Amino acid sequence: MRGMVFTATRSHEPPERSPLQVRPGDVVDVGERDTEWPEFVFVTAAVGSGWVPARHLSTDSGPAVVLAGYDTTELAVSDGDALTVVERDDESGWWWCRSTDGDEGWVPIEVLQPKGGPIT
């Protein structure tokens, strides 16, 4: 499904905080686990904070080392927007997508549908 075009079936608005980019070797403080998206934990780094998949970290509580880089940028979409899937993260329930304007970011899978019908 990578490179396929999908349609947003409803709007998604990113949080108001600035996106966070963490890199392997960064040290972060791990906070709470998300109740809606249980794969994610809230981290605070020297440059900001945001939700990161727990599997990208050395531990899921307290101080942790980032094992795999992650960018928390979410893409604002409206119902009917066409989006190209760039990267899939099925485990977390989010896909990195590109809009027709060239903007990129994470979009929840639940708001996406292939041009021909529901995701199967």
Image (cartoon, rainbow, N blue to C red):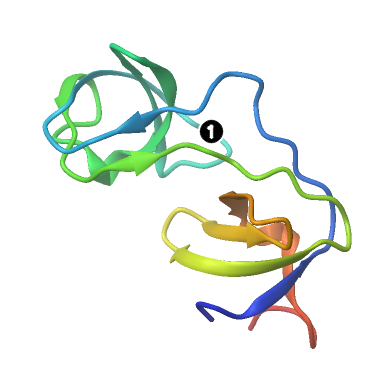
Q: Quadrant of the C terminus?
A: bottom right
Q: What SS does tag 1 mark? A: loop
Relative to residue 118, is residue 89 drawn left or right? left
Q: Is residue 15 above or below residue 99?
A: above
x 52%, y 42%: residue: 37
Check the image and report above or below for 105 versus 85. Answer: above
Mark 1 lies on residue: 35
Q: Give the amino acid type for the residue marked by disc 1 in the picture.
A: Thr
Furthest-bottom residue in view? Answer: 116
Locate residue 101 relative to residue 92 in the image: left or right: right
Location of residue 82 in the rendering, given as x and y in whole percent from the top left corner:
77, 67
Q: Find residue 50 and report its horizontal and vertical position in percent.
A: 45, 25
Give residue 8's quadrant in the image: bottom right
Residue drawn at x 19%, y 34% as measured from the top left = 66
Residue at 16% x, 38% y is 24
Q: Is residue 61 above or below residue 96?
A: above
Q: Residues within 10 Å of mark 1 (few under 14, many from 20)?
A: few
In the rendered structure, the answer to whether residue 117 lies left or right of residue 35 reads: right
Q: Quadrant of the N terminus?
A: bottom right
Q: Residue furthest right?
A: 80
**Which residue is drawn at the image coordinates 54% and 78% (left, top)?**
3
Instruction: Tell me the quarter of the picture where residue 114 sits.
Output: bottom right
Q: Nearer the viewer, residue 43 or 48?
A: 48
